[in-house]
Image (cartoon, grey):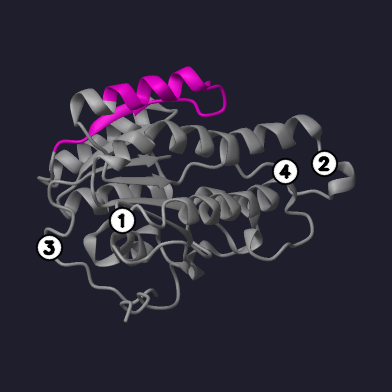
Amino acid sequence: MFEYHAPAGLLAERVILVTGAGAGIGRAAARGFADHGATVILLGRTTSKLEAVYDEIEADGAPTPTIYPMNLEGAAPHDYAELAAKIEEEFGRLDGLLHNAALLGPRSPIETFDAEEWVRVMQVNVNAEFLMTQALLPALSESGSASVAFTSSSVGRRGRAYWGAYGVSKFAVEGLMQTLADEVRESHGIRVNSINPGATRTNMRAHAYPGENPEHNPAPEEIMPVYLYLMGRDSEHVNGMALNAQSGSPPPLPA
């Protein structure tokens, strides 16, 4: 696993938005951020799942989170502008943004890949992340130490047959991360990186590998060190990096 031990209170007084916060890695990240002091904005399409995570965070005695239901597949630019306006009104800034929500889509050859499914996956996995990040950049700029983390995949770093739109979308996410990271490099107020979670015990992994024993993979809670690292001040010098949740250690401090 990524070698980082998050200190208590690492994220105290920080405001962090997590997409796909209702289950899997998003749920684990939201709870982990809250447990380390953050006020978390829980964004997802299923209100009942967000409410369950809300209740879990409240039961943990962590800062009270905020629920923001949103269907990324159908969201338009004005929806992201409204999200940004509400964050500015309630918090005045945004300290962290974890892009976690994604669609797997069918695993089939490019030759026979359904065109409508291609567009659907790209809408959620790429277009929504671009539109949300663009809309939230002003709020992130108000932080002074904001972190944007995109969720990548091993199939978004080296192409593999039959991963179709999902694999291509993750290549696009890496490109979006690198481009934005280079654009904010001199701002000293925003850093942008990506995380490859690796094989993790989630519903998406089960759909992608139905014959796999899920017990062989770590639970989402076990891969949280890299997520906590990127959202805390210990990573203020890290920008434009493609990190792995299940291997490695924090990049060294600059000389």
Q: Marks 2 and 3, how far apart in space? A: 47 Å
Q: What is the CA distance from the residue labelled 1 to the residue labelled 2?
A: 42 Å
Mark 2 is surrounded, within 10 Å at the Cα level, by few (under 14), some (14 to 19) or many (20 or more) other residues, namely some
Quarter of the rendering occupied by the C terminus: bottom left
Q: Quadrant of the N terminus?
A: bottom left
Residue on which disc 3 sits: 8
Q: Which dot marks residue 113?
A: 2
Label 2 vs 3, first from the N-terminus: 3
Name the N-terminal-most of marks 4 and 2. 4
Q: Residues within 10 Å of mark 3 (few under 14, many from 20)?
A: few
Q: Is residue 112 above or below residue 208?
A: above
Residue topped by disc 4? 106
Residue farthest toward the right in the current orientation of the protein? 111
Q: Which residue is mark 1?
A: 188
Please tell me in which quadrant of the rendered image residue 248 appears: bottom left
Q: Position of residue 233 (x, y in %)?
A: 22, 61
Q: Earlier in the sequence, mark 1 or mark 4?
A: 4
Q: Amino acid at mark 1?
A: His
- Kindly state the secondary structure of the residue where label 3 is placed: loop
